[in-house]
Amino acid sequence: MVVGNEHYYWEEQPYPATLSQRLPWVLTLLISLRLSNWKIGLPSHDSHQPLRPMTRTHFTRYAVFLAIQSFLILDATAFLTRRDPYFHPQPTGGTVKIDSPWPILPSNPLLAFLALLPPRLIRAGIISAQAYALITQGGSLPCIPIVLLNGLGYWPDEWSPHTWPPFFGPFASVHRGGLRGLWGGWWHQTNRYLSVPGRWVAERLERTTTMMTTTTTTTAAVGRKMGGWCRKGGMGRYALMVVSGFGFSGVMHMGMIPPEPSGTGMGAGEMRLWIAGFFWVQVLGIGVETVVEKVVERRWWKGGGGNVGRFLWVAGWLMCTVPMLAMPFRELRYWKYSPLPVSLIEYLGGHGWWNWG
């Protein structure tokens, strides 16, 4: 495979025969969160392997751009969270509601503009932007030296991030696909494997219903209906995969809460439920969206009007659900500390550039 002026040679490798060969083979599997360039027995995945990599130059330029973008987003959102009491526990033990008026900020045209927006929109937007920036920062800046080592011949191609798919897809997936496009097309896809148990259950149900079609007339009719529901492209298979993906994702993200948080007014179990609940409730949103789109099958919904409607629906849904993440993070005082050691915005405002002091 030739990409730009770079040559890549991919060949299928069977399970290694010796332990010394298996070790790097298994390590390659461990770092392939999305199983890139692996065949796993799923046609929807295997048909796209091997992936066409970026050139090292293209990846490095893109990674530098993402690193700068993430720095600016984190700097701006940290500037706002320091000054908004919503993001901090109050000395009296209470909390500021998400719909409380935005605090008065120094005279500035941009900050004055924020006062015109709904406080819930600003605060949910800050949380979402920080999550996006932290993930893109982690998938860009640390990868640059690895790609440089690969270019010098000191790092194998299959371990180099420029041969992996991008962390995020096109943002157009949001207005084209609604919540399904947000989570299945745009947001980082490193946890797609969590939907595999749901796919497995659907495949077993499809086999079972295929056997039912060989029995009595009534049982056969039920079997055909359930089989269509569970086969590839069926609503049942999709529903099982969504429940599996978000169900396990919620459980996995519970690990963000320490076993015994100190100095908080909320127990560890309650915090974990708030975080997991954010992911679990996405199943409901996707279900509502799917049913509504089945009912509203109009030409305008498939065009520009539908794009606007889907984008507004996603924005409204996230405004209602993202605050679930703020509850435990605020209790743990995540926003007390800046994610960046230096701040351009604070420096330009005359407050000094060093954050970690």
Image (spheres, rainbow, N blue to C red):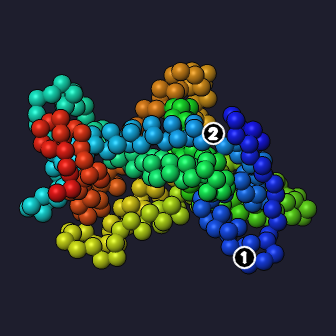
Q: Position of residue 305 (x, y in %)?
A: 51, 22
Q: Position of residue 245 (x, y in %)?
A: 57, 58
Residue for point 38% across, 60% down: 275
Quarter of the picture holding the N terminus? top right
Name the element at disc 1: helix
Left or right placement of residue 137 versus residue 78 in this view: right
User: Is residue 304 visible in the rendered structure shown here?
Assistant: yes
Left or right placement of residue 259 versus residue 118 in this view: right
Return the residue found at the far front. Answer: 152
Distance Cα–Cα, label 1 vs label 2: 31 Å
Residue for point 25% across, 47% down: 342
Residue 206, by quadrant, is: bottom right
Residue for point 78% across, 51% down: 10
* In contact (CB < 8 Å): disc 1 and disc 2: no
| Crowd tier of the residue under label 2, counting other residues whose Cα lies within 10 Å: few below 14, some 14–19, many 20 or above | some
- The residue carrying mark 2 is 55
User: Is residue 116 visible in the rendered structure shown here?
Assistant: no
- The residue carrying mark 1 is 20
Front position in the image: 106 or 3: 3
Name the element at disc 2: loop
- Asked if 30 appears above or below 47 in the picture, the reply is below
Return the residue found at the far right. Answer: 214
Q: Position of residue 176 (x, y in %)?
A: 56, 32
Left or right placement of residue 218 versus residue 76 in this view: right
- Asked if 108 appears above or below 193 in the picture, the reply is above
